[in-house]
Image: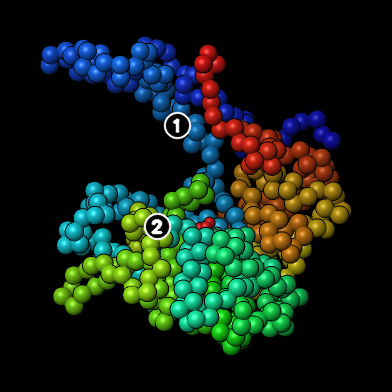
Amino acid sequence: MSGTVPNSPAGAPPRGPRETIFEIGSPESTCVTAPDLDVPDVDLAQVMGGAVRTAPPRLPHVTELEIMRHYAHLAEMNFGVDSGFYPLGSCTMKYNPRVNEDTCRLEGFTGLHPYQPAQTVQGALELMYGLAQALGEISGLPGVTLQPAAGAHGELTALMIFRAAHESAGDPRRKVVIPDTAHGTNPATVTMCGYETVTIPSDGNGLVDMDALRSVLDTDVAAFMLTNPNTLGLFDPNILRITDAVHEVGALAYCDGANLNAIMGISRPGDMGFDAMHINLHKTFSTPHGGGGPGAGPVCVTEALSRYLPGPVAVSFDDGTFGLDWPDASIGRVRSFHGNFGVLVRAYTYLRAIGASGVREAAEQAVLSANYLKARLNGVFDVPYDRGCMHEFVLSGARLKRETGVRTLDVAKRLLDHGFHPPTVYFPLLVEEALMIEPTETEPLSALDSFADALIAIVDEARSNPDLVRGAPYTTPVRRLDEARAARTPDLRWRPSSA
Ligand SMILES: *Cc1c(COP(=O)(O)O)cnc(C)c1O
């Protein structure tokens, strides 16, 4: 093992955490100067009695410069799409145009109250109506609710709609079928909705195994949930046969729409025979995400299922005005008011800015980027399901692990030293030592090439000096964490030493 600790390629020293804002500054520091008192002084203790605090609050005392440095440092420690390539598979970490931020901060939107009478909020209603129309057009499923706050919430909403439809037909069912490539939220949704999950294995090509599907389909199956293209980045060419088979037993077909970025403007889940889908606006339609929200997971359904949608929904009237209406068999509200409205404004802005042809171009470019990167990395890693991919692809680090002892986790950590956010790892579960890479359409060719070069360099390092890779990262604020402990017993609170 070499004696030197490798720095980042730029040679920058690690930028570690430093003091919290409570530890910097001094009691006399301040960044506000209050005007002189020009009204009679009041003795608060006399007015408010025992409610007046006896000691001043422990607020930071800092100058404006110290505040600026504090937040600039925090921003530098963070990694985001704005700082570098972020190929986190299934998450669609595309660039979020700044115009979205301008429009969602317009006072005409931020100053509204959701209880205002409809005639005073026509612009907001028009936006909701227009966005729902656009999503209905893109999905091929005309009934739309904008309420769900995330993809997982959209899945739950759709299954509740399915349940309502089955129950109103006097045919409650108990099971929901999902393939083994499904995102973890799918079985979680099934359980939350009171159904039982039936998992089917994929076929040798990573697609839905038709025989396995047929063998579990019966009149107790409420739905089949499928991500198409799936989490291997593969479009299922049997999709029409799949949805036909599902409908034959009276079940409904659900599309997990997280991968819409690959097909929007080209093919429509409604035309594939799906009855409902969710759309992650924060993925496909460019809202910053990754820090836990806010997001939005609108659900699009067939005409037949529209009557079960959560209410209210925005509607347009013949006289050109807009209002709110409740579908006649609505499952009720799934979220307060109208969902995460700021995210809806961002998505609508994005759609209006790029237009119908831009939607299609984005998908085409995303697929091209993924196929280019896959071609550059094929052979460096194994490609277990080597067909033309859609917007993402999955590599396997199994051979590297066998030959060098370096695991995919080590490769991911070493990528941090090379200045890249790692891809999704160890998912989907059916690929051993998986690396799931989604470059998105917004990355320039030079970024794709630098990323491929970095992975090639890391594989070389793994062969010549495996301990180097196993010890990574070296350049981050913290090194390897005990991830199980960090997730189960996080300690996120700072306490003053003298308290
Ligand atoms: C992101 C994702 C989800 C869940 O969406 P959230 O908005 O994070 O709740 C579901 N399925 C797939 C395939 C995803 O990538």
For the point 68% across and 83% down, which residue is it?
214
Color theme of the render = rainbow
Q: Which mark is residue 71?
A: 1
Q: Earlier in the sequence, mark 1 or mark 2?
A: 1
CA neighbours of label 1 inside 10 A, class few (<14), some (14 to 19), many (20+): few
Say which of 476 and 46 sits in front: 46
For the point 44% across and 75% down, which residue is it?
301
Q: Look at the image and tell me whether residue 380 can be seen.
A: no
Q: Position of residue 120 (x, y in %)?
A: 17, 58
Say which of 179 and 205 sits in front: 179
Q: Position of residue 422 (x, y in %)?
A: 64, 50
Q: Position of residue 303 (x, y in %)?
A: 40, 81
The N terminus, quarter of image: top right
Spatial separation of the CA atoms under disc 1 and disc 2: 33 Å
**Helix, strand or loop status at disc 2:** loop
Residue that mark 2 sits on: 335
- Three-letter amino acid code at the position of disc 2: Arg
- Three-letter amino acid code at the position of disc 1: Tyr
- In this view, which residue lies farthest toward the left? 39
